[in-house]
Amino acid sequence: MSAAAASAEQPAPKKNSKKLFIIIGVVVVLLLGGGGAGFMIWKKKAAEAAEAAAAEEGGEEVHAAAKPKPAKRDPKLPPAYMPLDPFVVNLADRDADRYAQIGVTLEIDDPKFAEEMKPYMPAIRNAVLMILSHKTAAELQGREGKEQLAAEIAREVVRPMGINIDDESEEEGKKKRKRAPVYNPVQQVHFSSFIVQ
């Protein structure tokens, strides 16, 4: 009987060792999976932190011409003027149907940049039309309104090229963060015609 009892006990350790091996394998797989997931989350947070630090320091990726340049430009190089086709747009007046016909010419400090802008012309015209369509006749009547419109156009026409200029009036209301100013190659916006009816 002792031989029978001994043979009955031997298969039991094989089953226990198989179960133990399976349990250890499952635990190892779970640990590896958890470690891999933890590593991926850590890498993602590190990348987000690096992007936030770069944005905080003003290191956002912008067009090469948007890097700060010296305030003085070479007087031997005249600026480039880029006239846009005239804009005819309905104004945002609610009391009457009013429209504006406005001719815009952009003064650009570098003729090379003017050439780079040409492929973006549909997006540039769209940006100007969007600005004009949100204006009322009263906003466009005085000199101050025209100057504000010129500033908005100068800021928005370079946006399709990846140059994001902060709005100075919005920054005054928010906490001021130290950021390197982004250089705008569009120096002036000139109006060649300005009719509001």
Image (tube, helix red, strand yellow):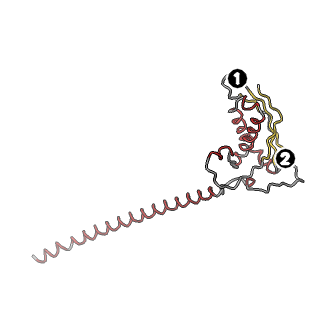
Left or right: residue 18 compared with residue 111: left
Secondary structure of the residue carrying tag 1 is loop
Real-space Cα separation, disc 2 to disc 1, in angstroms: 36 Å
The circle on residue 157 is: none
Quadrant of residue 102 in the image? top right
Residue occupying image coordinates x 54% and y 61%: 46
Measured as percent of width and height from the top left, residue 72 is found at 83, 55
Name the residue that disc number 1 marks: 97
Neighbours of disc 1 within 10 Å: few (<14), some (14-19), many (20+): few
- Say if mark 2 contacts mark 1, CB within 8 Å: no
Along the polypeptide, which appears first: circle 2 or circle 1? 2
Left or right: residue 44 compared with residue 19: right
Measured as percent of width and height from the top left, residue 33 is found at 42, 62
Look at the picture and state if 31 lies above or below 87.
below
Image mark count = 2
Measured as percent of width and height from the top left, residue 181 is found at 71, 53
Name the residue that disc number 2 marks: 80
Residue in the foreground of this view, choosing between 24 and 134: 134
Measured as percent of width and height from the top left, residue 124 is found at 73, 41
Check the image and name the residue furthest to the left: 1
Hey, what amino acid is under mark 2? Ala
Residue occupying image coordinates x 18% and y 73%: 9
Neighbours of disc 2 within 10 Å: few (<14), some (14-19), many (20+): some
Residue occupying image coordinates x 69% and y 53%: 62
Left or right: residue 87 compared with residue 31: right
